[in-house]
Image (cartoon, helix red, strand yellow):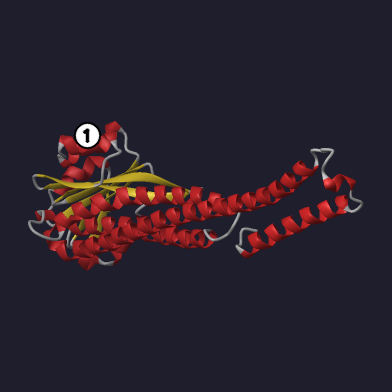
Amino acid sequence: MLINCIAYQHGRKLADLQVEQISDYLAKPDCFVWVALKDATTEELATMKQEFNLHELAIEDAAHGHQRPKIEEYGDEVFAVMHLVEEHEGQLHVGEVDVFVGPNYILSVRSGSKQDFLGVRARCEREPKMLARGSGYVFYALMDAVVDRYFPLIEKLENELELLEERIFTKGAARTSSIRRLYRLKRKVTVLKHAVTPLMEAAGKLQSGRVPPVCSSSRNYFRDVYDHLTRINASLDSTRETIATAIQVNLSMVAIDQTEVSKRLAAWAGIFAVATAFAGVWGMNFVHMPELQWEYGYPTALGLIAASCGLLYWRFKKARWL
């Protein structure tokens, strides 16, 4: 579906275009065309391929989707894939935006995501001097918008991790549920990691070494995006390590709880074992047992059993087994 198709000249909006007019405006000097598509069909991609003379391999990647974040060069054309990550009902969903950048055009194809880039277009139009840099600057603005949307997700993950760390030292079922939540949190971090790390590696091509000509005028701006991705990647690594540590601590605390229960059971078993031993001896009812004929034999036996159990209870209590 076509969202926008606009021509710009010297940083100013020139006209809203029909698809059939694109090739006419591409021929104008100092003019570039910015087209945005959402969930593009095969026919729409074929039309864009013809209008912009896009490389067939890049079109094939955009049509198939589910690509790893990357930036590739096809002659004077740059093709970029970025992941759009959004949270819905506690789950992270991954969409995709494919960007085709040429000397006088930029085409963005968004799929599988509700996020839009209307704010990016408005931002660029408010800065005509920057927009006059051409399609390379628009490419930077799109990439910057994608990267900036990762920050709130990371902040939310870090806040959730802090809450879970507090629950680790809470006894009972909370510890078991914390392990499940920690694993879910780890999966979210992995999703973001898969979106950020490849993009960071690819963005390095746009700010150091040989930079594609279409992006050369915005090299410093791409360096800023690269720095943001580096920070995000470091935060994800730190969060993932903290989650791994929290899982180990949680499992250790569960093991400690189980050990405490085992110690209590063993202590009570020892106490009842002594009482059972005394009762077993006096319950044999042999004829020549002095206690059977003694007037105070029964209360004495009960007192001895109680005293022995009490002594054991005191010893276990002192040893903190009870």
Q: Residue at x 31, y 63 (%)?
A: 123
Nearer to the camera, 104 or 169: 169
Q: Residue at x 14, y 39 (%)?
A: 53
Q: Residue at x 65, y 62 (%)?
A: 315
Would residue 80 be seen by someone viewing this image from the given angle?
no
Nearer to the camera, 256 or 316: 316
Q: Amino acid at mark 1?
A: Glu
The local secondary structure at tag 1 comes to helix
Q: Residues within 10 Å of mark 1 (few under 14, many from 20)?
A: few
In this rendering, position of residue 314 left or right of residue 48: right
Nearer to the camera, 36 or 261: 261
- In this figure, which residue is indicated by the disc labeled 1? 60
Nearer to the camera, 301 or 55: 301
Expressed as whole percent of the image width and height from the top left, the position of residue 135 reads 19, 55
Outermost residue, front side = 288
Would residue 19 be seen by someone viewing this image from the given angle?
yes
Expressed as whole percent of the image width and height from the top left, the position of residue 114 reads 41, 47
State the image quarter where residue 24 is shown: top left
Expressed as whole percent of the image width and height from the top left, the position of residue 272 reads 71, 48
| Picture quarter with the N terminus | top left
In this rendering, position of residue 38 left or right of residue 174: left
In this rendering, position of residue 18 left or right of residue 217: right
| Picture quarter with the C terminus | bottom right
Q: Residue at x 23, y 37 (%)?
A: 61
Expressed as whole percent of the image width and height from the top left, the position of residue 93 reads 41, 45
State the image quarter where residue 110 is shown: top left
